[in-house]
């Protein structure tokens, strides 16, 4: 994928409504190959939706989603599955199979797709688990591990087939500072060692400069800014400033739309009488 | 349409039926045989079948016991107490065995299959399979569906066996009847194909139904605690109603 196109992922004028609610509106986005790109934005801005569009789990109402030279939104299921073998995805809660051990969770994609002998699969799995620091937990079940450990196992599973594209949905949530540091380093190392294109969906403004080459900020249903982390830090775009500085007042409302508090309280009193 | 969205309006039951039929056809179209699949199917047969044995054995034994008690009491009034074993065997093989086994299976294994698949959707495990280019229909639905089709007839056999044993315990050991009379009455009237074979055919049909409804309601469960709870209830209700209806239809054709 990377040799063919310097742009690994391209979303062109994508609009999507879910349950009648607009999620994305005419969003265009380009993610370069071989780089680590952070996709950021306030909660509910549509970051995970972008990931689901890239993986073909969702199709846009209008616009196109390109992965290299493949138009994902028009692929048939067989072609989509072929493409997905080259994509590693870390979902928000890890999504480990609870009836399988950590070892078997990581081995699953290898057993399914690689055709390698079991002895070799064992070595690969142990190496992947070693990378995330959980080789010793290979025979434990997800219920016997903490949330952060489960996410690290899920990360090892996502990397099992050494995919060309890694998508991480909130990889740092629930991690202690040590695991956080290791995960940051791991994302960078995978990117550098294998030339993997990495897309990291995160809220973590403080950490983004440590791992990302490019940051894209999605708000108000579209892409509002993109650039190197230090460029965005100096941006005077009001949406970017509010997000980077964590300000409650700004273009992105903190409160869900509602009548005024006074009116609501008075209405409550009238109803009580 | 999102699989977890339920049809609404006056035509909802028909649309639900259509969706369930489409789901079954999709599951059949996605069927694939591999060593991984065989292993997973055996595991599901163990969970759905072997782990249902306690309720099937206990249920079967007491159904046989009470059925013989009631039949014996009624037939004694007509001086035909010797026919109790015949009535027991015919009612078990033709009707009670397949129907009661399926109802017990739906309560024990059907709900567990529904809850498991529903929770897999709620915790994104189905999404994870999909994203790993592993077909969840093939990996999750197929083994459980096949497990239902194999487990229900096998459990029906065991249920019938235990019920007959219950009948023997009551008629021979408690009432002091001749064992020879009990067995010969049964042997002389029960026909292998017409009574036993038809009952087993019903059990296979009920197995398809119970497995299908369990995986369907799990697959379409809303990904919340409440959604999974509702789906398990729907599995039991839908299986019970449809098995009783199908039983009448099959009996009408088989007699």
Image: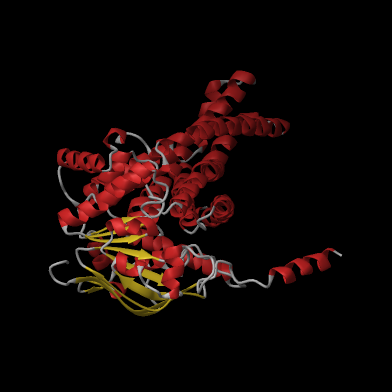
Count every numbered label the image shows and give the total.
0
Q: In the figure, residue B47 lies in which quadrant?
A: top left
Q: Is residue B124 visible?
A: yes
User: Does A250 sit above or below residue A147?
Assistant: below
Q: Residue at x 22, y 42 (%)?
A: A125
Q: In the figure, residue B152 lies in which quadrant?
A: top left
Where residue B178 appears, x then y in whole percent? 57, 20
Give the left or right position of residue A49, taking residue B97 as reference: left
Give the left or right position of residue A229, taking residue A118 as reference: right
Q: Residue at x 64, y 31 (%)?
A: B66
Q: Which quarter of the image is occupied by the C terminus of chain A?
A: bottom right
Q: Is residue B176 visible?
A: no
Where residue B249 appears, x then y in whole percent? 54, 57
Q: Which quarter of the image is occupied by the N terminus of chain A?
A: bottom left
Q: In the figure, residue A52 lies in which quadrant?
A: bottom left
Give the left or right position of residue A24, taking residue A258 as reference: left
User: Does B40 sit above or below residue B70?
Assistant: below
Where residue A132 appears, x then y in whole percent? 27, 43
User: Does B242 sit above or below residue B75?
Assistant: below
User: Does A207 sit above or below residue A4?
Assistant: above
Residue placed most toward the observer, A201 or B108: A201
Q: Residue at x 30, y 48 (%)?
A: A183
Where residue A30 appears, x then y in whole percent? 28, 73
Residue placed most toward the observer, B32 or A171: A171
Residue placed most toward the observer, A46 or A38: A38
Q: Residue at x 23, y 54 (%)?
A: A188
Q: As drawn, which residue projects farthest toward the right?
A: A273
């Amino acid at each position: 994928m990377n040799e063919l196109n310097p742009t690994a992922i391209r979303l062109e004028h994508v609009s999507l409504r879910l349950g009648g609610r607009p999620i994305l509106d005419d969003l265009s986005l380009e993610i370069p190959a071989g780089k680590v790109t952070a996709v950021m934005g306030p909660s509910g801005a549509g970051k995970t939706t972008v990931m689901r569009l890239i993986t073909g789990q969702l199709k846009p109402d209008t616009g196109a989603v390109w992965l290299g030279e493949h138009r994902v939104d028009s692929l048939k299921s067989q072609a989509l599955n072929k493409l997905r073998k080259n994509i590693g995805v870390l979902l928000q809660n890890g999504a480990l199979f609870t009836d399988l051990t950590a070892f078997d969770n990581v081995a699953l994609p290898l057993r399914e797709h690689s055709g390698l002998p079991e002895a070799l699969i064992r070595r690969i799995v142990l190496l992947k688990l070693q990378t995330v620091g959980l080789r010793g937990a290979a025979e434990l079940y997800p219920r016997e591990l903490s949330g952060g450990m489960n996410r690290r196992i899920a990360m090892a599973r996502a990397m099992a087939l050494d995919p060309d594209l890694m998508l991480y949905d909130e990889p740092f949530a629930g991690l202690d500072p040590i695991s956080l540091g290791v995960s940051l380093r791991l994302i960078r190392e995978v990117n550098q060692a294998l030339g993997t294109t990495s897309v990291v969906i995160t809220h973590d403004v403080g950490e983004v400069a440590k791992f990302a080459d490019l940051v894209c900020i999605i708000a108000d249903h579209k892409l509002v800014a993109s650039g190197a982390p230090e460029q965005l830090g100096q941006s005077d775009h009001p949406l970017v400033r509010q997000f980077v500085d964590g300000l409650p007042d700004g273009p992105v409302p903190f409160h869900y739309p509602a009548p005024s508090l006074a009116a609501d309280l008075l209405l409550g009193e009238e109803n009580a009488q | 349409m999102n699989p977890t969205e339920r049809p609404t309006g006056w035509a909802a039951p028909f649309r639900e039926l259509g969706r369930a039929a489409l789901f079954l056809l999709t599951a059949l179209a996605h069927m694939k045989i591999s060593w991984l699949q065989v292993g997973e199917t055996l595991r599901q047969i163990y969970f759905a079948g072997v782990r249902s044995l306690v309720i099937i054995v206990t249920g079967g034994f007491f159904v046989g016991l009470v059925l013989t008690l009631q039949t014996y009491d009624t037939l004694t009034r007509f001086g035909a107490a010797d026919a109790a074993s015949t009535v027991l065997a015919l009612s078990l093989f033709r009707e009670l065995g397949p129907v009661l086994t399926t109802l017990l299976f739906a309560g024990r294994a059907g709900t567990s299959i529904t809850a498991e698949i529903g929770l897999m959707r709620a915790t994104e495990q189905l999404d994870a399979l999909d994203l790993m280019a592993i077909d969840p229909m093939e990996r999750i639905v197929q083994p459980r569906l096949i497990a239902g089709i194999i487990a229900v007839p096998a459990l029906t056999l065991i249920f019938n066996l235990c019920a007959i044993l219950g009948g023997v315990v009551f008629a021979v050991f408690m009432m002091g009847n001749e064992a020879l009379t009990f067995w010969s009455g049964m042997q002389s009237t029960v026909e292998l194909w017409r009574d036993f074979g038809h009952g087993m055919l019903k059990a296979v049909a009920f197995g398809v139904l119970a497995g299908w409804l369990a995986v369907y309601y799990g697959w379409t469960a809303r990904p919340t605690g409440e959604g999974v709870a509702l789906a398990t209830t729907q599995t039991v209700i839908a299986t019970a109603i449809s098995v009783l209806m199908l039983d009448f239809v099959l009996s009408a054709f088989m007699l």
